[in-house]
Image (tube, rainbow, N blue to C red):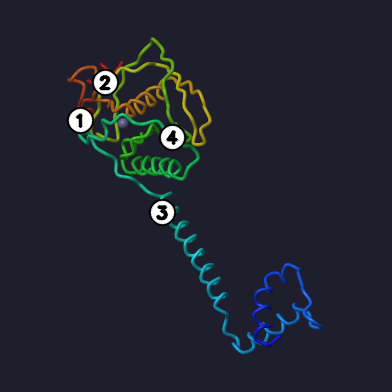
């Protein structure tokens, strides 16, 4: 067998040899021939890496940069404060669609956006307890509240309402300068799912009850102005402050 033939055979069998398979060609072991020729080749090439090594290294670097890119994008997504749609935007009137896929990056990103947008609004305006997905232009049945502790409610549905009702001045991120007097159920029960699809039942009274009714209304395209007890009870917040005493008499 010529040197060239030996080299060809040895390169072909190189992979097999690494898995522990060896053959004997005459008096010389095939593994020895392959190892010797490989060493010679590397010696001829000096310290310059082989094309296979270069391809492998390029793939490793590509995967590394791709992973870093996804990671940085994910970080950006987690800290995104979204624009809150204002009264008059048709998207606020859309009926939202139920969430079908849970524990997904998209759902996680939506919840994070709602959380950050809520916190940003609260920092700038001094109030804010809840926000609904359509308010940031996402027509999905998701709301996020923070009343002492943050909570995302997916596909919330009011399954029970008390007969007893309360009246209150309501406000909204989508018309932050207005107050609207509305009538709400004093207590309710809400079925919802968490971000991994687990079902829960939440019993709420008073302030939490009216907050949930407000946010769940958003998912139907219903706004607090639609719930006004009459047209006289949609007022500017600044005027309410001027006439607080007069308004307080009819607050009950
Ligand atoms: Zn609102």
Residue indicated by mark 1: 236
| Numbered disc 3: secondary structure | helix
Locate the C terminus by quadrant: top left
Q: Tell me the distance, in whole angstroms, between the alpha carbons under discs 3 and 2.
A: 37 Å
Q: Looking at this view, is 220 or 238 the one in front? A: 220
Q: How far across and down, in percent of the image, does residue 10 sit?
A: 68, 78
Residue designated by label 3: 76
| Residue at image point 45% right, 19% down | 189
Query: How far, Cα to Cα, is label 4 from label 1?
Result: 25 Å
Image quadrant in which you'd find residue 167: top left
Q: List the residue tagged with mark 2.
A: 227
Is the residue under label 3 in contact with that under label 4 (CB below 8 Å)? no
The mark that comes first in sequence, 2 or 4, is 4
Q: Is mark 4 within 8 Å of ligand 1?
A: no
Residue at the top extreme, as displayed = 163
Q: Are marks 2 and 4 in contact (CB under 8 Å)?
A: no
User: Is 139 left or right of 244, judged from the image as shown?
Assistant: right
């Amino acid at each position: 067998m010529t040197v060239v033939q030996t080299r060809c055979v040895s390169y072909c069998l190189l992979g097999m040899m690494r898995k522990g398979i060896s053959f004997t060609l005459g008096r010389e072991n095939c593994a020895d021939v392959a190892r010797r020729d490989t060493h010679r080749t590397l010696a001829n090439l000096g310290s310059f890496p082989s094309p296979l090594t270069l391809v492998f290294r390029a793939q490793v670097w590509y995967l590394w940069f791709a992973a870093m890119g996804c990671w940085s994008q994910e970080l950006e997504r987690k800290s995104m404060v979204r624009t809150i749609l204002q009264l008059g935007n048709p998207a606020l009137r859309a009926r939202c669609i139920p969430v079908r896929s849970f524990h997904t990056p998209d759902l996680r990103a939506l919840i994070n956006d709602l959380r950050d947008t809520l916190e940003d609004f609260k920092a700038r305006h001094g109030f804010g307890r809840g926000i609904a997905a359509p308010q940031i232009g996402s027509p999905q049945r998701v709301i996020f509240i923070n009343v002492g502790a943050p909570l995302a409610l997916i596909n919330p549905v009011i399954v029970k309402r008390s007969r007893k009702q309360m009246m209150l001045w309501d406000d909204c991120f989508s018309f932050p300068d207005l107050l609207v007097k509305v009538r709400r159920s004093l207590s309710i029960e809400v079925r919802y799912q968490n971000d991994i699809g687990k079902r829960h039942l939440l019993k709420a009274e008073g302030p939490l009850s009216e907050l949930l009714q407000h946010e769940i209304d958003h998912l139907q395209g219903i706004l607090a102005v639609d719930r006004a007890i009459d047209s006289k009870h949609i007022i500017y917040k600044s005027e309410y402050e001027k006439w607080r005493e007069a308004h307080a008499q009819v607050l009950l």
